Image: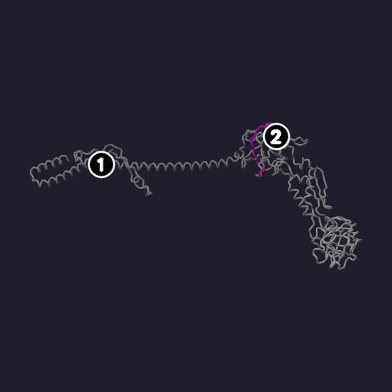
Amino acid sequence: MFLFFLSILCYNHICMKFLEAPVMKYFRILSSVILAGAVFTGSLFSDPLFASAADLPATDIEIVSMEEITESPDEQNPKIVPPQADPFGSHPVASQAETTGTEGSREKREAKTADMTETDSKAETEYAAVASTETEAESAAEASTEAEAETENSAEASTEADSGSKSQAETSGPAQGLYEIASAVDEDFVFDVRHCTVQNVDSQAVQLFRSLNVNQQKFYLETLPDGSFRVSVLHTGDALTALPDENAVTMAAMECPEDAAAAQSQTWIIENARHGCCCIRTADGQYLTLASYRPYLGASVVLSDYTGAVSQMWRLDPTWISPEACADTDLVNPYGEDGPYANLRLSLLFGTKAETITADELSAQIMENEDHQLVLDPAFLDNFVAQLAEKYDTQGQPKSFRTSYGNEITLYEGDFGWKLDTNGTRALLQESLETNQIKCLEPVWAHKGRSLDGDDVIGDSYIEVDLENQKAFLYKNGKKLLETDCVSGTLGNPDRETPGGVYSIYYKNSPDVLDGPGYSEFVNYWMPFHGGYGLHDATWRSKFGGDIYKTNGSHGCVNLPLKAAERIYKAVDIGYPVVLYK
């Protein structure tokens, strides 16, 4: 290549010396073209890329597959592959022909090299950014997968723990310490070892009582080696003891651990329940249970099978030793077995019948008021008296009556009959509740009838008035004592017409003066039966009966001859029935 270059220079020099100027101009141009081609050809074949494999330097070559430079499926985010480093280092040093070239060729070469370097740098930066993003996404996905796997493992472990260790979870109890044991039914009431000043009352009984901050209501829970508990009351040290044969509990001296059977009766298992409460049971599965859904003072605690009811749930409230050892909690159900009124029996008399209230019935109706005091449920007496009124009231009800003529009629008007004074009767019962005796009481009546026995409410003693035939009759114990003519209120005048129905004499007076609009009359015998209506003598009349009432009747009363009025007045008493009909 060097010799070829040298021959061209020599040939050019010769031609410049012997050829003419015009010809020389075109010859020099042709020579320059040939020279440039020679320079390019020389530089090309001097580049190491065209060298043979034997001439290559001993360098490890990294093979890049076509997959690495293909675009990702997401055409919007093509995968950028970093430019591969030149396995041979930077661009090779230019050949001698290039170094001897023009200044322009060198500058172009340097500019081209700089452009390639800048392009490579940008590509590397873009690749680093995308690669970093992909690495972060892959790391996050791997972390998420690991977290999900851990969660699944945790859930499986939890399920296994729930199914395999259920008994442990249920029986995990409280820490050893001092507690008040409150009822979940009403947390104002706690376990209480009854302390009594009354003789012959069991002072070891377990009951519920309002919290008094005394040591007889504080219980020490001692953890036993097997995880169960012994429960002892603070003020005496006695242990809570099960009486399974009686389905009851009591307090007893601490048993010796060597006596297995006795010790088991004082062993309790505490199980977690809902709402922060617990259940307390024996080793045999009998649960402490509130005997009533009303935790009134003195309510008892018994043993029963598990029901899940709130009466079997208890709250353990941590507490502290009180300076007060005990307090009187001998307030028991007053009508219960140990109560002061255990023998009470009240009977209300209704004719030959009696309606009775016993202490046992009252015992079931005891409740606590807002001050946590024992009282009888007010609704009990209200309902009891209302039932009596419904059963025995006859006032206002239709009444059958057989007239002196033998025919049967039904009367709808009138106030005759029995009407119980419910308020008065309730007050009478309330006053009689605080006694330990058997009592017979007479109900308080707002209005009395004649008989409470049988269906004949009018009875066989009465005054009968036939308003149509103007006749009056007097019967006593089924016998007719009197029959007389009479004069009733003026027919057709609403203000003066005598009302029909069944009534009764509500008072008597002899003599009396009857005053009314436009009149004032003296009478010897006055027997009112309905407001201002009554029976009386009418000495100003000379005749009775017939059709007098149609034109010259009374102001509404039943006028009688003097002798008849006297006879009736002396034979009847207050409440005597008066039957009027047409």
Q: Residue drawn 73% across and 42% down?
A: 374
The amino acid type of the residue labelled 1 equals Ala
Q: Quadrant of residue 12?
A: top left
Residue 111 is tagged as: 1
17 or 407: nearer the viewer: 407
Place of residue 451 in the rendered image (x, y in percent of width and height, measured from the top left): 84, 56
Residue projecting furthest to the right: 563
Q: Quadrant of residue 450?
A: bottom right
Identify the image quadrant of the C terminus.
bottom right
Q: Quadrant of residue 200?
A: top right
542 or 478: nearer the viewer: 542
Q: Tell me: 34 left or right of 382.
A: left
Residue 216 is tagged as: 2
Q: Residue drawn 47% across and 41% down?
A: 146
- Work out whether residue 150 can be spotted: yes
- Could you say whether the residue bearing mark 1 is in a helix, strand or loop? helix
Give the tally of numbered discs: 2
Place of residue 489 in the rendered image (x, y in percent of width and height, measured from the top left): 83, 64
- Work out whether residue 299 can be spotted: no
365 or 222: nearer the viewer: 365
Place of residue 541 in the rendered image (x, y in percent of width and height, measured from the top left): 89, 64
Q: Give the residues in magenta.
A: 310-326
Q: CA distance from mark 2 to mark 1?
A: 103 Å
Residue 241 is tagged as: none
Number of residues whose C-alpha sits closer than 10 Å to that of mark 2, classed few (under 14), some (14–19) or many (20 or more): many
Number of residues whose C-alpha sits closer than 10 Å to that of mark 1, classed few (under 14), some (14–19) or many (20 or more): few
In magenta segment, residue 323? yes
Circle nearer the N terminus (2, 1): 1
Identify the image quadrant of the N terminus.
top left
- Could you say whether the residue bearing mark 2 is in a helix, strand or loop? helix
The amino acid type of the residue labelled 2 equals Gln
